[in-house]
């Protein structure tokens, strides 16, 4: 970015109001900083000429703020220069402290992100036991059904802690869309008295709903998997990842990567797409040992 010194501190607020606004991708930056008693202000991005980044900056700036000297009063044009700035907002305290050495940033601590970046990924000892137990059961279902990819929907709430639905997927020759996640979500719909898909050539007992009672929705706005976790033996494809997103799963755990079609790590990270309207946390349990 192009920066300059403010010669008259009393004009700092006036300059911040009259200089061109920073673009949306830079709103995490503070406009003015105090460097060893000297106020400095962000002006604008440098020009496209790598040999002369300051080319026509003064002329373009004067044209942008108008001819009135009051609009740029107190700005020292002789100190125009380039400076390194953080291009992205800090997400953690460590990032904030590091980026602040370049230029002051706005920062709003997010405890969830900080927890996820710890060694335990924000998962308690009790939750680890639940994860291991659920995967052991899920892999036993996988083995029972000829090692087909399988999915388990689990309610981690303190008053519940139960498996809501579990299902292996169908072989392609039975139905190309009957993937494990689709069938498991369908099992949740059955428990909530919702619509159950009539998959062709798929025995009704393939959907193994294990919850002993219906799981009532707590709010009218609840989706099928609001507050629920999904466990998958295999990384889901784009279709299944979107189905989990639309059903509002809380967290997704998977053990085996799907190099050719995986939508959470292998070929794309769908849950990180900026335009989606729901995000679930994704955990890849590497080298999971059933024993």
Image (cartoon, helix red, strand yellow):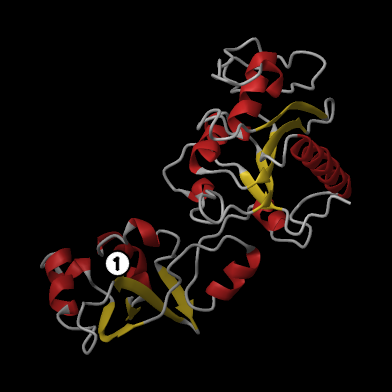
- Please tell me in which quadrant of the rendered image residue 130 appears: top right
**For residue 133, above or below residue 80:** above
Taking the spot 30% from the left edge, 63% from the top edge, the residue there is: 14
Packing grade of label 1 (10 A; few <14, some 14-19, many >=20) is many
Front residue of 69/223: it is: 223
Above or below: residue 120 compared with residue 220: below
**Residue under the point 49% across and 78% down:** 102
Residue 183: percent from left, percent from top = 62, 27
Image x and y of residue 89, in percent? 49, 62
Q: Is residue 225 visible?
A: no
In depth, the one of 266 and 226 nearer the eye is 266
Q: Position of residue 231 (x, y in %)?
A: 71, 40
In the displayed structure image, the side of residue 158 where residue 105 appears, left or right: left
Give the quadrant of the N terminus.
bottom left
- Say which element carries label 1: helix
Instruction: Residue 40: give x, y in percent of width and height.
Output: 39, 77
Residue at the spot x=69%, y=23% of the render? Answer: 206
From the viewer's side, name the closer residue of 174 and 209: 174
How many labels were placed on the picture?
1
- 117 left or right of 48? right
Residue 288 in view of the camera: yes
The residue closer to the viewer here, 3 or 6, is 3
Q: In this view, which residue lies farthest toward the top?
A: 193
Identify the residue under disc 1.
15
Instruction: Please say if 249 is above or below 281.
Output: above
Q: Tell me the residue at 58%/75% (across/down).
A: 98
Query: With 202 as the anchor, is 289 left or right in this view?
Result: right
């Amino acid at each position: 970015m192009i920066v300059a010194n403010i010669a008259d501190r009393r004009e700092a607020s006036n300059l911040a109001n009259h200089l061109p606004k920073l673009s949306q991708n830079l709103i995490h930056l503070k406009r003015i900083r105090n460097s060893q008693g000297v106020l400095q202000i962000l002006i604008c991005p440098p020009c496209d000429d790598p040999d002369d980044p300051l080319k026509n900056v003064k002329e373009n700036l004067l044209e942008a703020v108008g001819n009135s000297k009051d609009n740029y009063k107190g700005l020292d044009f002789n100190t125009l220069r380039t400076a390194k700035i953080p291009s992205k907002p800090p997400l953690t305290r460590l990032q904030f402290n590091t980026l602040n050495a370049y230029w002051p940033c706005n920062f709003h601590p997010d405890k969830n992100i900080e927890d996820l970046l710890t060694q335990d990924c924000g998962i308690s000892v009790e939750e680890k036991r639940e994860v291991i137990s659920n995967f052991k059961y899920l892999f036993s279902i996988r083995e029972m059904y000829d090692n087909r990819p399988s999915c388990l929907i689990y309610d981690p709430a303190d008053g519940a802690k139960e498996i809501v639905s579990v299902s292996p997927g169908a072989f392609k020759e039975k139905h190309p869309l009957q993937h494990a996640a689709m069938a498991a979500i369908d099992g949740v719909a059955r428990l909530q008295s919702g619509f159950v898909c009539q998959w062709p050539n798929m025995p009704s007992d393939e959907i193994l709903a294990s919850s002993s009672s219906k799981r009532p929705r707590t709010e009218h706005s609840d989706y099928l998997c609001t507050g629920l976790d999904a466990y998958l033996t295999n990384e889901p494809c784009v279709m299944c990842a979107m189905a989990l997103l639309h059903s509002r799963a809380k967290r997704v755990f998977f053990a085996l990567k799907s190099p050719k079609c995986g939508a959470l790590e292998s070929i794309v990270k769908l849950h990180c797409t900026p335009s989606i309207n729901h995000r679930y946390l994704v955990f890849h349990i590497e080298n999971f040992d059933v024993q």
